[in-house]
Image (cartoon, rainbow, N blue to C red):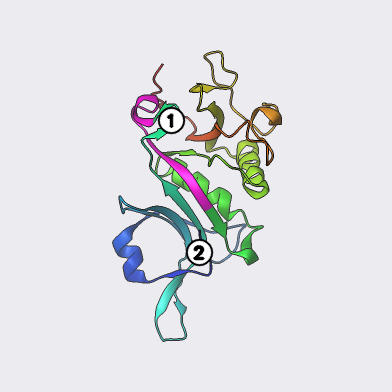
Amino acid sequence: MIILPLTYSPSTVARRFIVLEKIRVNGGDAEYLVILSEDKNELVAAIIESALTLMDNGDTRHKVVAKLDLCRKDRVEQVLIKDTWVSQEVAQIEGIVVDGSLRDMGFATVLYEAVIDKAKLVLLSDNEQYQGAKGLWQRIARTSNLVSVYVLDTDANRYFPYDGNRLAYDGTSIPEDEIWSTHPDKSKHAVLLVAERNNSEKSLAA
């Protein structure tokens, strides 16, 4: 479970993370860093304030405004990761959180896009989608120029529309009842959203 507020020391950022990009949001003056961990045992992406904050104990640290926990897996249901994505690194989302005072600034979308576009990771959704996560996926599918979203049935190891082709999800192009099921209904538990970099060379196994 991700809990904010959270801070990182400059030494931790330098030791554990690579900087994917520097950003300003909505034309603001504040600069942020999008970072990704290089730790093989813990895959984490975050957006931190570039400027250091003086803490009560006298230390200076970077405030975390958004954090994304990811997990590398060998298999998801009937999908063998290395066989389906031959030359791409894949991670499944375990959770994302954004500072409550900044949730309308698009940090979650920026974080997803940076991990996919800059780090060239393929992201898989979690098996359970709550309303906030559902809305985030719909927004990315509808508005992002950097990311393409597809719907994958991991039980059948086939993409919608399940005829050998892939139809990109744009927020409306695929019926919602093909993607989501509402608790306690788990009929779509095995259906995942797959987010990939636009215009990348995709080496998907047949």
Residue 104 occupies which quadrant of the picture? bottom right
Label 1 neighbourhood size at 10 Å, few (<14), some (14-19), many (20+)?
few
The number of callouts visible is: 2
What residue sits right under mark 1 in the picture? 200
Quick one: 139 or 184, which is closer to the camera? 184
Question: How far across and down, in percent of the image, does residue 165 sit?
Answer: 53, 16
Cα distance between the residues tagged 2 and 1: 28 Å
* Element on which disc 2 rests: loop
Residue at 29% across, 63% down: 15
In reply to whether residue 82 is colored magenta, the answer given is yes
Question: How far across and down, in percent of the image, does residue 14 sit?
Answer: 31, 64
What residue sits right under mark 2 in the picture? 31
Residue type at mark 1 is: Ser
Q: Residue furthest top?
A: 163
Q: Is residue 184 shown above or below 51?
A: above
Quadrant occupied by the C terminus: top left
Residue type at mark 2 is: Glu
* Residue range of the region highlighted in magenta in the rendering: 81-95
Q: Residue furthest bottom?
A: 57
